[in-house]
Image (tube, rainbow, N blue to C red):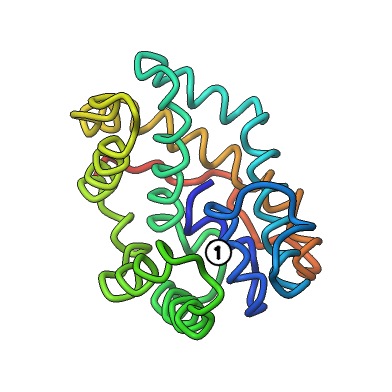
Amino acid sequence: MNYLAHLYLAGDDDAEITGALLGDFVKGPLEKIALPEDIVDGIQLHRAIDSFTDTHPIVERSKQRLASRGLVAGIIVDVVYDHYLVNHWEYFTHERFDAFTHYRYERLLTHLDMFPAPMRKMVPLMCEHDWLGAYGHIENVALALERIGKRLSRPGLLDNVKADLIQHYQGLEEDFFDFFPAVIAQHARQQRIDSAPHLPHSPIITSAR
């Protein structure tokens, strides 16, 4: 799961919003992390969601669609699922997307001092340029993935990824609709959400944007 999905699943609690983003950057045993307990809980939730996602057969199906990309197929799936979440937001919550992102950006900036140095540079850029909303456009998904690819030890693994996204767009979208309700059902109760959001019986499948 990528940034948007983790923030969605974290609910409205300040500490868990912070932990949801920190989970991508904090490694190792949490017992040794000098952070408040409630933020550590958010990191633990992040890890639990990632574990559930990484071993889920529907996510594996998505990776198989991108098998030609090898080990980076999982990275592609994580980011493109955020794209579908943006574009089908109304299926999962009644909250307006811009209100959701505004609150999360505000909370993250408020807790900026708790982030490691690289994140203290990244988070303001995320908020200023609305990275979460930008995932709604497939061109921005491809650009984000190519930027990730430049940081990998083997260059070129994510070059020209837009062609793969378009080729497999509908299949990956169908996988997302099969998978995301499952991750909500698995983890929503941990976020003090009493029931999962209403989901349609027949989701509308769209063409690539």
Please report the residue visible at 58 percent of the width from the left and 52 percent of the height from the top.
200
Please report the residue visible at 67 percent of the width from the left and 29 percent of the height from the top.
55
Where 123 falls versus 75 (above or below)?
below
Quadrant of res 65: top left
Instruction: Report the front residue among 119 and 182.
Output: 119
Instruction: Report the front residue among 117 and 172.
Output: 117
Whole-percent x, y for residue 74 in the image: 48, 30
Outermost residue toward the top in this view: 68
Where 78 falls versus 126 (above or below)?
above
Three-letter amino acid code of the residue under disc 1: Leu
How many numbered circles does the render carry? Answer: 1
Tell me: 47 left or right of 139: right
Tell me: 39 left or right of 83: right
Whole-percent x, y for residue 195 in the image: 77, 64
Where 25 falls versus 40 (above or below)?
above
Please report the residue visible at 68 percent of the width from the left and 53 percent of the height from the top.
184
Quadrant of res 172: top left
Instruction: Report the front residue among 186 and 153.
Output: 153
Whole-percent x, y for residue 102 in the image: 42, 81
Instruction: Assess disc 1: are there few (<14), some (14-19) or many (≥20) residues with their C-alpha within 10 Å of its C-alpha.
Output: many
Q: Which residue is mark 1?
A: 7
Quadrant of res 161: top left
Label 1 element class: helix
Please report the residue visible at 45 percent of the width from the left and 21 percent of the height from the top.
71
Tell me: 118 left or right of 1: left
Whole-percent x, y for residue 46 in the image: 65, 54
Instruction: Report the front residue among 78 and 150.
Output: 150
